[in-house]
Image (cartoon, grey):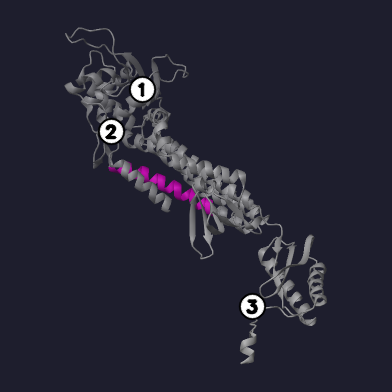
């Protein structure tokens, strides 16, 4: 329901200014140059012409709306009368093609079977189906002396065939088009309420239906949290309910007996709801699939592959959001082609201004491809020692032994020296054991043999290298260096084995009567002959 509330809020914001009519009757002198290149009434394409016409009807500016009819002699009074009849015909059962389906090309749709200068944009109400056709005509431009120059802007206007059908029923339609009651944004308030209630009821119906399907599947499957079918349905059904509601509204709304202004506006912006539903569905599906893959990879301890899945999930979700954003901007009537072209011009400036961001993205790719670490590895990166918690698109997070989080940008991370302790296949056992001075050579050899026997008898000590040798005559002890490898991959297990080895060595030396040395100092006092005689 929160999603539906957000949709209503979006529609409310859009309803506050439902149409922006670019067409203005007077053209200021300072804009004469721009007006020569662009039609002042916005009739360059079928989409812009229909949108501007509906905007004029919403404002009930029928004098302005008359400019969108191919009236002979550009009669403003005749155009205004036709505009009223046109609106009345649409309000009483006529139909217009929704905004997204109208051609935004100056040449119109060339594959519709009509003449190149004709475009079908709807149907008039009446016993016989009368198509609403736009005709493309070349306006005659005037020179500074008021003489026609023979060239001008090509514009789309309601064709003479459609005007003839309107003329036959103009008086009847004018009476039928009288609006009583409270009017909001060019349409009765009741029509707006009817359309919003229809959308709400459709969404509620499909949402309850999807909830019932999920409940039934949860009862059927043995373990819903593991079942792939349940995961897919849980991800797909909520946004699918919103998408079905948008489709239902699109089918019914195009023929709803409400004012054309309200109907066309809602049909235009229902496309935003549909794109939001598709993006919502795709994102939830990506999360479900990525979650399933991540759980399987973690179970197999393939943590690097799991990190790659997390990175890919974020990239795909960004791509989905970008596609949905472009589609929504197009539905709002914003020319995205100009923006995309501007991206090419500003690409160099963007690259220069975002060098660090690009460096971090490349570093992320290098970390995932080279796989020096994985999530969960204990490592040292530069002077940072800790466990890798996340490898993101911009940075890598490491939890230190002090339980703090250190975030390292991936561009910097990939260039540092990385020491991965989790990649060890064995652990070094290299203590130096000091025996007390004062023992005999035979006892020293016995001590070395005891240590060698402990290493030889332990099943997890590698055979090569494996040694215990007298290394030095230390300041306080006879130093025996032990060098061997403990063949276990886990650090905690290696600590337990290390302790066991040291305890066995200590017990063996204790039984042989050999003590471990500790720092000592012997002081010899010498008395010379004179002192002795005195």
Q: Which residue is mark 3?
A: 519
Q: In the image, residue 195 lies at what x, y percent? A: 37, 42
Q: CA distance from mark 2 to mark 1?
A: 16 Å
Which residues, given as a range, are shown in magenta? 189-211
Determine the secondary structure under disc 2.
loop
Q: Please give the residue where the numbered disc 2 appears in the rendered image.
A: 20
Report how far apart the C-alphas of labels 2 and 3 lie in the structure: 92 Å
Q: Residue at x 31, y 19 (%)?
A: 163
Residue 509 image offset from top left, x and y in percent:
77, 78
Query: Which quarter of the figure has residue 53?
Result: top left
Q: Compared to 8, does 141 lie above or below?
A: above
Q: Is residue 254 left or right of residue 436?
A: left
Is there any visible trace of residue 176 in the rendered image?
no
Q: Position of residue 499 (x, y in %)?
A: 70, 72
- Picture residue at 26% right of the left edge, 38% below the top: 185
- The quarter holding residue 17 reads top left
- Which-is-in-front pick, marks 1 and 3? 3
- In the picture, the disc for residue 45 is 1
- The Cα–Cα distance between marks 1 and 3, rounded to whole angstroms, is 96 Å
């Amino acid at each position: 329901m929160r999603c539906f509330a957000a949709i209503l809020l979006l529609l409310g914001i859009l309803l506050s200014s439902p149409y922006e009519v670019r067409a203005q009757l007077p053209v200021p002198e300072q804009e004469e140059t721009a007006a020569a290149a662009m039609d002042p009434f916005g009739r360059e394409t079928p989409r812009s012409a229909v949108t501007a016409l509906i905007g004029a009807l919403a404002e009930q500016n029928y004098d302005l709306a008359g400019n969108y009819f191919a009236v002979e002699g550009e009669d403003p009074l005749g155009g205004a009368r036709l505009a009223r009849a046109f609106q009345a015909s649409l309000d009483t059962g006529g139909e217009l093609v929704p905004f997204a389906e109208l051609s935004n090309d100056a040449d119109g749709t060339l594959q519709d079977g009509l003449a190149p200068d004709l475009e079908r944009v709807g149907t008039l109400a009446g016993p016989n189906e009368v198509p609403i056709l736009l005709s493309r005509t070349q306006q005659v431009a005037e020179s500074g002396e008021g003489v026609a120059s023979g060239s001008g802007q090509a514009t789309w206007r309601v064709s003479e065939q459609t005007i003839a059908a309107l003329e036959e029923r103009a008086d009847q339609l004018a009476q039928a088009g009288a609006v009583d009651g409270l009017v909001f944004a060019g349409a009765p308030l009741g029509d707006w309420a009817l359309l919003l209630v229809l959308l709400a009821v459709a969404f509620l119906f499909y949402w309850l239906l999807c909830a019932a399907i999920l409940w039934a599947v949860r009862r059927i499957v043995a373990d819903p949290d593991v079942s792939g079918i349940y995961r897919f349905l849980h991800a797909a059904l909520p946004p699918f309910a919103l998408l079905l509601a948008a489709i239902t509204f699109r089918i019914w709304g195009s023929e709803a007996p409400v004012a054309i202004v309200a109907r066309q506006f809602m049909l235009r912006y229902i496309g935003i709801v549909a794109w939001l539903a598709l993006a919502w569905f795709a994102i939830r599906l990506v999360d479900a699939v990525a979650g399933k893959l991540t759980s399987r990879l973690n179970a197999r301890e393939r943590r690097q592959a799991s990190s790659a899945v997390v990175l890919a999930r974020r990239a795909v979700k960004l791509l989905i959001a970008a596609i949905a954003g472009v589609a929504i901007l197009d539905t709002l009537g914003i020319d995205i082609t100009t923006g995309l072209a501007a991206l090419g011009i500003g690409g160099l400036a963007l690259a220069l201004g975002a060098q660090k961001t690009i460096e971090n993205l490349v570093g992320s790719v290098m970390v995932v491809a080279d796989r020096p670490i994985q999530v969960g590895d204990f490592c040292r990166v530069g002077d940072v020692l800790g466990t890798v918690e996340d490898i993101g698109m911009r940075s890598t997070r490491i939890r230190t032994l002090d339980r703090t989080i250190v975030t390292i940008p991936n561009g910097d991370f990939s260039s540092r020296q990385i020491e991965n302790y989790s990649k060890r296949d064995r652990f070094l056992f290299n203590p130096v054991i000091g025996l007390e001075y004062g023992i005999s050579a035979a006892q020293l050899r016995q001590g070395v043999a005891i240590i060698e026997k402990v290493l030889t008898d332990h099943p997890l000590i590698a055979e090569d290298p494996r040694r215990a040798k007298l290394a030095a005559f230390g300041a306080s002890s006879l130093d025996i260096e032990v060098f061997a490898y403990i063949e276990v991959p886990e650090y905690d297990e290696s600590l337990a084995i290390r302790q066991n080895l040291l305890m066995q060595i200590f017990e063996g030396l204790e039984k042989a009567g050999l003590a471990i040395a500790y720092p000592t100092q012997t002081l010899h006092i010498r008395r010379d002959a004179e002192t002795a005689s005195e």
